Amino acid sequence: MVTVALAGAASGFGLTMLRTFIHLNSTATNPHKLVLLSRSAKPDLAALGIDVRPVDYANHSQLVEALKDVHTLLSVIGGSLEAMRDAQLALIDAAKEVGIKRFAPSEYACISNDNIDLYRPKAEVWEATKKAASETGMEITSFQCGIFMSAFATGTTKLITEVGQREGAKTGEEEALAGLRPWNFVVNMRGGTADLPADGTTPIVFTEMRDIATFVYHALSLDAWTEVMGMRGDVKSYREMLAIIERVQGRKFLVKENSVEEMEALAAGNPFYNQVRVALSEGWGVVPDTLNRAFPDLHPTTCEEFVEKWWSGVEVGEASWGEDQTFM
């Protein structure tokens, strides 16, 4: 058992991680002490036994005080990239002073932050993290999970399940998205369209949000952390995903292939979406299976299981590029 502080876990994916930790703690032989660093009081979470510590990330002494008895610090801070960078750099400074043993910044993506303009603040935080580790001996890691499988639930009309009821979700879609906003990335599940990176045959790791949280929870018990710890829910190409989706939905998708040259040209108007698609076509999405090998008894959700659960029996119309297209 260790004392674990989560920063940025009062909403979004961070809240899904915190709720998953609470659930896993309830059946653990040696449950961890969970601390939430929050910009405001959270009485609903405090009522669940969470030690909620309000902090101002611009107040160094307050951060130091909040971290004094913490062993492991996990950042799942979201929001604007600049705010995420500044808050995490402040966390790193406080963690160094107080002697935090382990720190993981808010990574949760693919194999690097290179060539993605929007990830430059993440890269800056990672460099500061490595510098802190070299100065203090703090163990650090970049948790890498590939692409969020849960985005494939965008648009589902399936009903809420026991998990969503436990977590307070209002709809099945909210439960399935697990802290993500509705987001049609590459594949539009309701529209029936796919805007592929290259020919769509490059393998990519897809991991469901609660599975990410479960892997991280188990990583807390490892004797030592390595600088990169990857996890894999499933490995599929977008072409393989489309075959699953078309079978489950019972319709053919409209598909567009995009060459690297075409995506690079499109990046002038939509940098993040197209830079990510270029990177995915070049193998960026194949993260290591570090935590799968460390915890072979964990059985994360496969892409087929996820699509079956959230789209089997859902009525969908004829595929159309004009319907509900919200590609980032």
Image: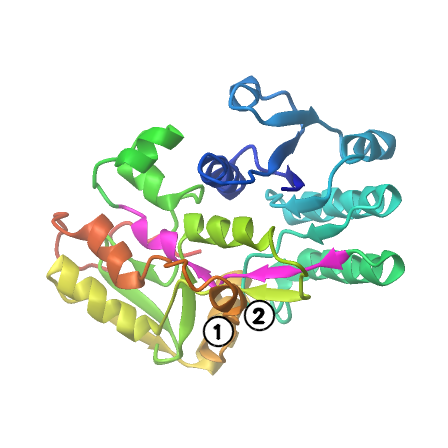
Residue at (11, 49) in percent of width and height? 313
On screen, residue 183 versus residue 291, left or right, reads: left
Image vertical order of residue 212 relative to residue 54, above or below: below
* Of residues 17 and 13, the one drawn nearer to the viewer in this rendering: 17
Region in magenta:
139-155
On screen, residue 267 versus residue 60, left or right, reads: left
Residue at (48, 73) in percent of width and height? 286
Q: Which residue is mark 1?
A: 286
Residue at (25, 68) in percent of width and height? 242
Q: Which residue is mark 2?
A: 111
Q: Secondary structure at mark 1?
A: loop
Give x and y (percent) for residue 194. 29, 66
Give x and y (percent) for residue 289. 50, 70
Residue 324 numbered mark, or none:
none
Image vertical order of residue 72 relative to residue 254, above or below: above
Q: Quadrant of the C terminus?
A: bottom left
Instruction: Check residue 9 for magenta coloring.
Output: no
Ranked by sequence position, the earlier of labels 1 and 2 is: 2
How many other residues sit within 10 Å of disc 1, few (<14), some (14-19) or many (≥20)?
many
Going by the numbered disc 1, the residue's amino acid type is: Val
* Of residues 50 and 179, the one drawn nearer to the viewer in this rendering: 50
Q: Secondary structure at mark 2?
A: loop
Dot 1 and dot 2 residues touching (CB under 8 Å): yes
Give x and y (percent) for residue 239. 29, 74
Going by the numbered disc 2, the residue's amino acid type is: Ile
Tell me how the rendering is colored: rainbow
